[in-house]
Amino acid sequence: MKKLTMLITALLLMGLPQAQDAEGLAIVGYTTPNYEQIKKDCTDKQSDRYYPKLIKRFAEVDTALDIADMQTFYYGQAFLDGYSPYPSYDEFEEIQAIMSKDETPTIADSRNIIKLANTVIAQNPAEPMAYYYKFVGQNIACKYFGGDTLELQKVQLQFQMLFYTIASTGNGTTPELAMHVVNPSHEYMMMSMYGFHEKEQVLVSFNGSDYDMFVIDTNEYGVDTLYFNIDRIAGAWDKLLFSDEEEESETVTGLFLELGEKFVLELKKPKRNNSQFVVVSKEKIGDTLVCDRDSLFREPVPKNQVVGYFCPMRLSDDDETVFNCLVFISNCRKKWLYYDTYISTDADGKTFSTTSNNGMPRGVLMNEMWPTDVKILNINNIRTKE
């Protein structure tokens, strides 16, 4: 498989400047991200660039997305609760282990890579490396097993759009033309795509901004140094270092769930948008449950806590139909509870959608019901005020 993956970069970028569907992202000059506007747009429900709306459009490969939309999509992740300047995805390590094998890839390799990439996309739909690896999986399927070429083209375009977005901010040859990133690994991704090899890395500051400066090995472009603006990374890191120690160690703003889990949350600041909460516990539930208020959901819930289930369920003992359900048992001082949910399917090639709710009363509520292929949830923005 090693020889095959060596071709992936060339295939991903093939036709990039000419791709008709990506014409809206063609770079004419460079556009420095307007972070203040991006923060405002991606968190404003009335904005056309409200983040869940952009997630849906990108998942559908909406070719009307322009540079401003895509910059809000990529850089907006730095303003969402749960953003980490140094995210770690175990799935990438699993994918790399599959890709490092010397044997001819199998259809199981393809499916596993796609599944792992989709898991990361469910957690962060603006992670370009997830689309890179998904392209690897789709390419294996198409090259050896007659896979879906339309899906291959779709994920290729998704990666290209994110690549263009970072490249739209500068060529990296000077601090003023630095490429802006929200994750240090994206620096190496961009250098790899351009065929650059770094010899040295130095953290530098100019005019109040922070940069990673790379000394580049000899190349056909004559580039000797490359700059990446890391203001969003540095700002998030400082916030982590200097935030209140107790709140940092206890509270989170998002909850990633795999099918078959029970969880208990304690809301810390439920009155504000993007409420913080503590994950009191999570445990595996292996059986199909029956959604019965009189038996399953009778447990007491302390004030300002939520007990939840994301499990396969039947609606009654007599009903044989199984749904994958999200159930909350809440006991908040305020009567109503609100939340937003990103949903991921686990089937090959499928992506995800978003939902929100109009508020649920204190007590037990069957929040959501999905077909059995929905296996991953990302819940955030849990709050008692709309």
Image (cartoon, helix red, strand yellow):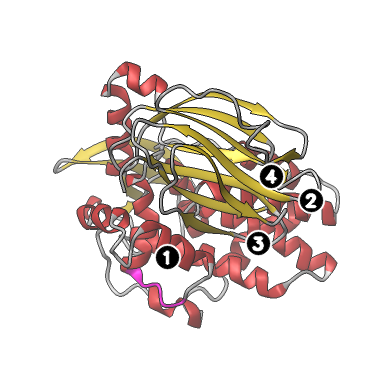
Circle 1 is placed at which residue position? 164
Q: Residue at x 42, y 58 (%)?
A: 52
Q: Mark 4 = which residue? A: 95
If you read the primary sequence from the N terminus, does the residue marked by circle 1 or circle 2 appear first?
1
What is the spatial separation of the Cα atoms under label 4 and label 2, in whole angstroms?
Answer: 39 Å
Kind of residue indicated by mark 4: Ile
- Label ID, residue 233: none
Sequence-wise first label, 3 or 4: 4
* Range covered by the magenta-colored residues: 63-67
Q: Is residue 28 left or right of residue 132?
A: left
Cα separation, mark 3 vs mark 4, equals: 18 Å
- Main SS, magenta region, reads loop
User: Farthest residue toward the top?
Assistant: 246
Q: Earlier in the sequence, mark 3 or mark 1?
A: 1
Q: Is residue 269 above or below residue 291?
A: above
The three-letter amino acid code for the residue at tag 3 is Lys
Separation of marks 3 and 2 at Cα, in angstroms: 28 Å
Q: Quadrant of residue 91?
A: top right
Q: Which x, y percent locates residue 59?
A: 53, 64
Which one is earlier in the sequence, the residue at label 3 or at label 2?
2
The residue under label 1 is which amino acid type?
Tyr
Q: State the separation of the CA atoms marked 1 and 2.
A: 50 Å
Query: Which numbered marker is on residue 350?
Result: 3
Circles 3 and 2: CB atoms closer than 8 Å: no
Q: Is residue 274 above or below residue 164?
A: above
Mark 4 and mark 2 in contact? Answer it, CB < 8 Å: no
Mark 2 — residue?
319
